[in-house]
């Protein structure tokens, strides 16, 4: 073996100015240049035409943004669409001016213009970025991408996979149905499509090996579809919800991910070589295969790894429950909701009149028909809030609070054995959830249903922290 | 309402895709039985070099891969025209792989691996090595330039599992 001629230690190269790539990843800032633009992608396979989409860099999902905890994001978003847009960094506790809600925290990015976002994510975990202008159409056409903040010392896994799950409403020629924001979707379950995808592909396969350990980051980018996934014989360990770590627990139950929610799993692939295993969604009446694991013939290892899978504890400040201010928020309206009247622009009127203007939902009897409204909660920075959300409608609502995570304390009066941080909790019909959080991030923050048609139809409010 | 059309599409798509799945599965790691030998591939040419079946290595370089998401060595200097036999050892407990390329090709490929975990992934400039095993590939560096290698398994590349190859002109 002849090594002396050409095998040199890394240090020599470093001196000559060529830094190992690993150092690049440790620099303080991640510079990103992303363009919102039309694109084409083959969602439903070779037997159908490609689908015209809107995507970040023309792709669906958009270009993944990935950095290490402690690094800052320095992102320039260009708008090459014919409509205005803006980018919201979903689940990141960032300064209000960087939150990307056009019309509230910034002006929309006009066609041909760009906007510069700069912030340092304070938490590691699984997040996403998406349009926040006419989101029910722009997300529905594909304007979203993964945003991953790596832990300083992540658990060791063979592969770290991200599945952005979406739900498309396609016509027979595989083009996107243009009926965004129609009255039925606004007043019922939101836009539920007919083609559920993983990373932009319908019924793709995921090749795995027996014994392999996978970290699976699930991100629900659907307009309104919620998922309840089962993984066959596998026993997934849940390690994070909405980006925040939980004490890892193995579950036999399905993994529920509401619209905009995220769940991180550790999967030890225990199937036989050569076997196949579908991942099944059964949230709605009809279950179906979302995707399929296909085991390769050669096993990787006989026994699963036994290394630790726990993530570092969350860094979010704990609310002071003894001195917290309590707020009760009641969601009402929608089809079969029984709401008779509500306040629109400060004026009481019948729901029929409200619906004539395109709105059907109310929070504490107030229709959220604008972004800038008298705040639902108006509080001082640093105060602790106990927030009870009561869903008195016939539909589930994934309720997203911008700029904060809330600690889920109880469901229907039953305390959780381990309260957990969430930013997009799915509140089921007739369900009551109790949360607490520290209002530590100053600004006017949106609090809204992430079933995007619901938000467009009035299910939104403002939390003001000064 | 268009619900009738939609369900027709969903069913039609399900059938069409199910049919294509059964024919498209190829096992990318099927050459593990011959780890002591160099697998044979078709001739391949890339900007970072080439593979010709049966070519004789002029040098051998040992590369070790670890679960710290690092290669050792992580920088290599060679000369244009060198035909290198890479003996790639996986010293860790996890899967790892050694993939030659340019900064652009590796970054792009890593993103694809992340997005489409079912994609084909087997070329003469790649070595997928099981824990505790080793594997060899032979590659000719026919062009001078700055090239890279990396482990493109999702999460590994982003954790810094990459290195550089500097090929000086002859």
Image (cartoon, helix red, strand yellow):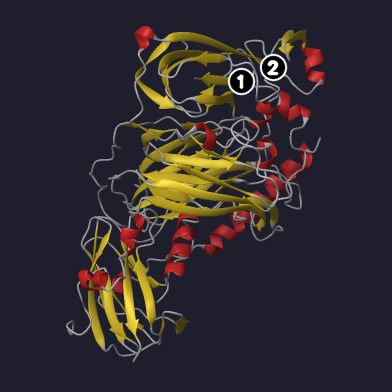
**Circle 2/circle 1 CB separation < 8 Å:** no
Residue A125 pos. (x, y %): 39, 39
Tag 2, which secondary structure? loop
Dot 2 falls on which chain? A
Residue B6 vs A26, above or below: the answer is above
Q: Where the C terminus of chain B falls, by quadrant?
A: bottom left
Residue A50 pos. (x, y %): 69, 58
x 42%, y 35%: residue: A243
Residue A16 pos. (x, y %): 27, 74
Report which residue position mark 2 lands on. Answer: A367
Report which residue position mark 1 lands on. Answer: A461
Which image quadrant is residue A45 in? bottom right
Whether labels 2 and 1 share one chain: yes
The answer to which of B29 and A376 lies nearer the viewer is A376
x 61%, y 36%: residue: A106
Report crowding for label 1: few under 14, some 14 to 19, many 20 or more residues within 10 A (C-alpha): many
Q: CA distance from mark 2 to mark 1?
A: 8 Å
Q: Is residue A170 left or right of residue A297?
A: right
The answer to which of B115 and A45 lies nearer the viewer is B115
Q: Earlier in the sequence, mark 2 or mark 1?
A: 2
Which image quadrant is residue A99 in? top right
Residue A172 vs A188, above or below: the answer is below
Report crowding for label 2: few under 14, some 14 to 19, many 20 or more residues within 10 A (C-alpha): many
Whether residue A431 appears in this view of the structure is no
């Amino acid at each position: 073996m002849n090594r002396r001629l050409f095998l040199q230690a890394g240090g020599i190269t470093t001196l000559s100015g060529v830094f190992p790539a690993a150092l690049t990843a440790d620099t303080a800032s991640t510079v990103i240049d992303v363009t919102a633009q039309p694109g084409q992608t083959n969602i439903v396979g070779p037997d159908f035409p490609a689908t015209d989409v809107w995507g970040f860099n023309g792709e669906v999902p958009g270009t993944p943004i990935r950095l290490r905890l402690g690094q800052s994001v320095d992102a320039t978003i260009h708008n090459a669409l014919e409509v205005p847009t803006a980018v919201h960094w979903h689940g990141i506790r960032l300064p209000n001016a960087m939150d990307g809600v056009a019309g509230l925290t910034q002006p929309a990015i006009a066609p041909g213009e760009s906007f510069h976002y700069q912030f340092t994510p304070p938490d590691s975990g699984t997040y996403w970025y998406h349009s926040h202008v006419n989101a029910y159409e722009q997300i529905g056409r594909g304007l979203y991408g993964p945003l991953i903040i790596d832990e300083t010392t992540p658990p060791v896994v063979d592969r770290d996979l991200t599945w952005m799950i979406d739900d498309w409403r396609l016509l027979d020629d595989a083009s996107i149905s243009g009926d965004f924001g129609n009255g039925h979707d606004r007043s019922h379950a939101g836009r539920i499509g007919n083609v559920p995808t993983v990373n932009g592909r319908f019924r793709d396969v995921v090749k795995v090996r027996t014994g392999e350990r996978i970290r699976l980051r699930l991100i629900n980018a659907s307009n309104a579809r919620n998922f309840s996934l089962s993984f066959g014989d596998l026993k997934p360990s849940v390690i994070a919800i909405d980006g925040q770590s939980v004490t890892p627990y193995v579950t036999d139950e399905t993994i529920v991910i509401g619209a905009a929610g995220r769940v991180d799993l550790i999967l030890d692939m225990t199937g036989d070589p050569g076997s196949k295993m579908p991942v099944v969604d059964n949230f709605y009446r009809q279950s179906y295969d979302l995707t399929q694991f296909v085991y390769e013939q050669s096993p990787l290892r006989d026994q699963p790894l036994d290394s630790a899978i726990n993530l570092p504890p969350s860094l979010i400040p704990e609310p002071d429950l003894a001195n917290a201010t309590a707020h009760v928020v009641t969601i009402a309206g929608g089809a079969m909701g029984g709401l008779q009247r509500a306040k629109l622009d400060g004026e009481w009127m019948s729901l029929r009149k409200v619906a004539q203007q395109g709105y059907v939902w109310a929070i504490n009897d107030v229709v959220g028909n604008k972004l800038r409204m008298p705040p639902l909660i108006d509080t001082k920075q640093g105060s602790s809030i106990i927030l009870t959300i009561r869903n008195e409608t016939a539909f589930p609502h994934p309720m997203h609070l911008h700029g904060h995570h809330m600690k889920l304390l109880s469901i229907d009066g039953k305390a959780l054995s381990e309260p957990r941080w969430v930013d997009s909790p799915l509140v089921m019909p007739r369900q009551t959830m109790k949360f607490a959080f520290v209002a530590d991030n100053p600004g006017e923050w949106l609090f809204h249903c992430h079933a995007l048609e619901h938000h467009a139809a009035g299910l939104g409010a403002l939390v003001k922290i000064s | 309402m268009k619900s009738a059309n939609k369900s027709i599409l969903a069913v039609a798509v399900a059938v069409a895709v199910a049919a294509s799945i059964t024919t498209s599965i190829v096992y990318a790691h099927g050459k593990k039985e011959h780890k002591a030998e160099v697998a044979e591939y078709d001739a391949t040419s890339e900007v970072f070099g080439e593979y010709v079946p049966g070519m004789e290595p002029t040098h051998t370089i040992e590369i070790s891969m670890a679960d710290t998401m690092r290669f050792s060595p992580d920088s290599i200097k060679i000369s244009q025209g060198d035909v290198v036999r890479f003996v790639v050892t996986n010293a860790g407990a996890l899967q790892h792989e050694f993939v030659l390329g340019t900064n652009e090709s590796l970054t792009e490929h890593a993103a694809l691996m992340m997005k489409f975990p079912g994609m084909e992934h087997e070329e003469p400039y790649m070595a997928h090595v099981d824990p505790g095993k080793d594997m060899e590939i032979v590659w000719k560096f026919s062009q001078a330039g700055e090239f890279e290698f990396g482990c493109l398994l999702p999460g590994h590349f982003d954790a810094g599992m990459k290195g550089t190859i500097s090929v000086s002109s002859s």
